[in-house]
Image (spheres, rainbow, N blue to C red):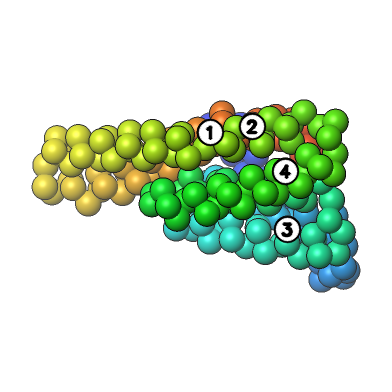
Amino acid sequence: MEFSQDDFDRLLRFEHARKSAEATYAEDPLDADNLTNWGEALLELSQFQTVAEAKKMINEAISKLEEAMMLNPTANAMWSIGNANTSYAFLTPDLSEAKNYFDKAADYFQQAVDEDSTNELYHKSLEVCAKAPELHMEIHKHSSSQQTVGSESSPSSNAKGSKKKANSDMKYDIFGWIVLAVGIVAWMGIAKSHVPPPPI
């Protein structure tokens, strides 16, 4: 997977946000907004990882967001946990296991809507989450057929490299779908405005 300049800028921005949140946490572990920022930064950074590393980072994001929720249950934190569970579900090939995460996401999106019924993004996320299992099946069907075609067409000496590339491409495709389906683009533009830009 190749990164564009925009991707690289986002990576730097959210790595800075993660480090800043970690430093703030050391001084004040009861700052719920900081914990939310930390969880959201981890969720964004997970998009630049391998599938295994992404899942690990998403779990860490969920942990930070749950900690924030215990201190101050805001609609934004609820919505962010919903996004984290949705992201984890899309990275889980087994639909029955993924469905558990989609169900958790739907619960959190509903809580966010209940908390702030005027936020259109929360409503849209809840609506799209209902269609997520169907989208999940399509993504994984498509990616497994790509891997089959890739393994049939590549010589055995390149099979290991091709499989690694296919896994990387699959992760990129999945995150591409997440961006479209869940509205992370809108999230970046609207709800993320509180994440500080890196210093110049």
Q: Is residue 89 above or below residue 191?
A: below
Q: Are marks 2 and 1 in contact (CB under 8 Å)?
A: yes
Q: Amino acid at mark 3?
A: Leu
In the displayed structure, does residue 143 sit left or right of residue 195? left
x and y percent of residue 164 in the render?
31, 49
Q: Quadrant of the N terminus?
A: top left
Rendered residue at 57%/36% (across/down): 130
Q: Determine which of the numbered discs, if any, sits on residue 65 in the image.
A: 3
Q: Amino acid at mark 1?
A: Lys
Q: Amino acid at mark 2?
A: Glu
In the displayed structure, does residue 167 sit left or right of residue 31? left
Viewer can see residue 196: no
Whole-number angstrom distance, CA of label 3 to CA of label 1: 24 Å
Name the quadrant containing residue 60: bottom right
Rendered residue at 85%/39% (across/down): 116
The residue carrying mark 1 is: 131
Question: Can you tell which of label 3 and label 2 is closer to the viewer?
Answer: 2
Please, what secondary structure does the residue beneath circle 3 have?
helix
Whole-number angstrom distance, CA of label 4 to CA of label 3: 16 Å
Q: Quadrant of the C terminus?
A: top right
In the displayed structure, does residue 178 sit left or right of residue 110? left
Give the crowd class for mark 4: few <14, some 14-19, many >=20 residues within 10 Å.
Answer: many
x and y percent of residue 12 in the render?
66, 45
Q: Determine which of the numbered discs, if any, sits on residue 127 in the image.
A: 2
Please report whichever mark, 3 or 1, sits nearer to the chain's N-terminal start: 3
The residue carrying mark 4 is: 110
Q: Is residue 38 above or below residue 186?
A: below
x and y percent of residue 13 in the render?
70, 44
Q: Amino acid at mark 4?
A: Gln
Whole-number angstrom distance, CA of label 2 to CA of label 1: 7 Å
x and y percent of residue 147 in the render?
25, 40
